[in-house]
Protein backbone atom coordinates (compact mmCIF):
# COMPACT_ATOMS: atom_id res chain seq x y z
CA UNK A 1 0.00 0.00 0.00
CA UNK A 2 1.42 3.36 -1.02
CA UNK A 3 1.90 5.91 1.73
CA UNK A 4 0.75 9.45 1.23
CA UNK A 5 3.04 12.19 2.48
CA UNK A 6 1.54 15.04 4.44
CA UNK A 7 0.81 18.21 2.55
CA UNK A 8 0.77 20.21 5.78
CA UNK A 9 3.75 22.62 5.81
CA UNK A 10 4.24 22.42 9.59
CA UNK A 11 4.73 18.65 9.34
CA UNK A 12 7.58 19.16 6.88
CA UNK A 13 9.09 21.96 8.94
CA UNK A 14 9.02 19.80 12.08
CA UNK A 15 11.00 17.07 10.33
CA UNK A 16 13.39 19.67 8.91
CA UNK A 17 13.99 20.94 12.45
CA UNK A 18 14.69 17.41 13.64
CA UNK A 19 17.13 16.87 10.78
CA UNK A 20 18.82 20.19 11.61
CA UNK A 21 19.46 18.90 15.13
CA UNK A 22 20.89 15.71 13.63
CA UNK A 23 23.41 17.75 11.64
CA UNK A 24 24.84 19.16 14.85
CA UNK A 25 24.93 15.80 16.59
CA UNK A 26 26.65 14.13 13.64
CA UNK A 27 29.27 16.89 13.50
CA UNK A 28 29.92 16.53 17.25
CA UNK A 29 30.32 12.77 16.71
CA UNK A 30 32.84 13.36 13.90
CA UNK A 31 30.53 11.97 11.21
CA UNK A 32 30.68 14.60 8.45
CA UNK A 33 29.07 12.22 5.98
CA UNK A 34 25.91 11.83 8.08
CA UNK A 35 25.95 15.55 8.87
CA UNK A 36 26.03 16.36 5.16
CA UNK A 37 23.13 14.00 4.46
CA UNK A 38 20.99 15.52 7.22
CA UNK A 39 21.91 19.01 6.01
CA UNK A 40 20.55 18.11 2.58
CA UNK A 41 17.44 16.66 4.21
CA UNK A 42 16.95 19.82 6.28
CA UNK A 43 17.08 21.93 3.15
CA UNK A 44 14.81 19.65 1.14
CA UNK A 45 12.13 19.44 3.81
CA UNK A 46 12.24 23.12 4.75
CA UNK A 47 11.95 24.17 1.10
CA UNK A 48 9.02 21.80 0.68
CA UNK A 49 7.41 23.32 3.80
CA UNK A 50 7.82 26.81 2.31
CA UNK A 51 6.44 25.70 -1.03
CA UNK A 52 3.48 23.82 0.44
CA UNK A 53 2.68 26.88 2.55
CA UNK A 54 2.43 28.79 -0.72
CA UNK A 55 0.15 26.34 -2.52
CA UNK A 56 2.76 24.16 -4.23
CA UNK A 57 1.71 20.67 -5.34
CA UNK A 58 3.84 18.15 -3.41
CA UNK A 59 6.08 15.97 -5.54
CA UNK A 60 8.86 13.52 -4.78
CA UNK A 61 12.03 15.35 -5.63
CA UNK A 62 15.43 15.59 -3.98
CA UNK A 63 17.04 18.20 -6.25
CA UNK A 64 17.49 21.26 -4.06
CA UNK A 65 18.07 23.56 -7.01
CA UNK A 66 14.78 22.56 -8.61
CA UNK A 67 13.00 23.16 -5.30
CA UNK A 68 14.78 26.49 -4.93
CA UNK A 69 13.73 27.48 -8.46
CA UNK A 70 10.10 27.03 -7.43
CA UNK A 71 10.70 28.89 -4.16
CA UNK A 72 12.43 31.81 -5.91
CA UNK A 73 9.37 32.21 -8.11
CA UNK A 74 7.49 32.99 -4.89
CA UNK A 75 10.19 34.95 -3.06
CA UNK A 76 13.13 36.27 -5.08
CA UNK A 77 15.18 36.90 -1.92
CA UNK A 78 15.69 33.14 -1.64
CA UNK A 79 18.02 33.32 -4.64
CA UNK A 80 20.77 34.18 -2.15
CA UNK A 81 20.69 30.51 -1.10
CA UNK A 82 21.53 29.20 -4.59
CA UNK A 83 25.17 28.31 -3.80
CA UNK A 84 24.07 26.46 -0.67
CA UNK A 85 21.57 24.36 -2.61
CA UNK A 86 24.03 23.69 -5.42
CA UNK A 87 26.61 22.34 -3.00
CA UNK A 88 24.28 20.43 -0.70
CA UNK A 89 22.09 18.72 -3.31
CA UNK A 90 24.75 16.06 -3.91
CA UNK A 91 24.91 15.21 -0.21
CA UNK A 92 21.77 13.12 -0.66
CA UNK A 93 23.75 10.60 -2.71
CA UNK A 94 26.92 10.49 -0.62
CA UNK A 95 25.35 8.76 2.36
CA UNK A 96 22.83 6.65 0.44
CA UNK A 97 24.76 5.08 -2.43
CA UNK A 98 28.25 3.60 -2.81
CA UNK A 99 30.16 6.12 -4.88
CA UNK A 100 33.75 4.89 -5.28
CA UNK A 101 36.22 7.74 -5.43
CA UNK A 102 33.79 10.32 -4.02
CA UNK A 103 35.08 11.43 -0.63
CA UNK A 104 32.72 12.69 2.06
CA UNK A 105 32.66 16.45 2.45
CA UNK A 106 35.03 17.90 5.02
CA UNK A 107 33.44 18.69 8.37
CA UNK A 108 34.47 22.34 8.02
CA UNK A 109 32.52 22.62 4.76
CA UNK A 110 29.43 21.13 6.36
CA UNK A 111 29.77 23.50 9.34
CA UNK A 112 29.99 26.49 6.99
CA UNK A 113 26.94 25.36 5.05
CA UNK A 114 25.12 24.74 8.32
CA UNK A 115 25.39 28.44 9.16
CA UNK A 116 23.79 29.39 5.83
CA UNK A 117 21.15 26.70 6.30
CA UNK A 118 20.24 28.21 9.65
CA UNK A 119 19.75 31.58 7.93
CA UNK A 120 17.38 29.96 5.44
CA UNK A 121 15.50 28.25 8.25
CA UNK A 122 14.95 31.62 9.95
CA UNK A 123 13.32 32.93 6.77
CA UNK A 124 11.14 29.85 6.35
CA UNK A 125 10.06 29.80 9.98
CA UNK A 126 9.03 33.45 9.66
CA UNK A 127 7.10 32.76 6.46
CA UNK A 128 5.18 29.90 8.03
CA UNK A 129 4.52 31.87 11.23
CA UNK A 130 3.34 34.96 9.39
Image (cartoon, helix red, strand yellow):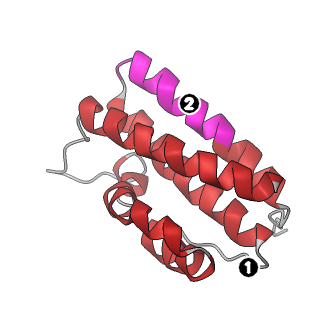
The crowding category of the residue bearing disc 2, from other C-alpha atoms within 10 Å (few below 14, some 14 to 19, many at least 20), is some
Up-down: is 58 above or below 6?
A: below
The picture places residue 103, in percent across and down from the top left corner, at 19, 43
Classify residue 92 as left or right of residue 70. left
Residue 3 figure quarter: bottom right
Where residue 36 is drawn, which disc sits there?
none
Mark toward the start of the polypeptide (2 vs 1): 2
Q: Secondary structure at mark 2?
A: helix
Classify residue 45 as left or right of residue 80. right
Which of the image's four quarters has the N terminus?
bottom right
**At 76% across and 74% down in the image, what residue appears?**
54
**At 67% across and 77% down in the image, what residue appears?**
59
Residue range corresponding to the magenta coloring: 17-30
The picture places residue 95, in percent across and down from the top left corner, at 39, 45
Where residue 22 is drawn, which disc sits there?
2
Determine which residue is flagged by label 1.
56
Front position in the image: 119 or 67: 119
Up-down: is 100 above or below 7?
A: above
Up-down: is 85 above or below 39?
A: below
The answer to whether any part of residue 109 appears in the image is yes
Front position in the image: 27 or 122: 122
Which of the image's four quarters has the C terminus?
bottom right
Query: Is 22 contained in the magenta span?
Result: yes
Amino acid sequence: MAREESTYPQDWLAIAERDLDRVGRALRDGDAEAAAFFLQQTLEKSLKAFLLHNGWQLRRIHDLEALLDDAVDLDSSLESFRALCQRATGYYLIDRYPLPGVPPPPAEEVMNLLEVTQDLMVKIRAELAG
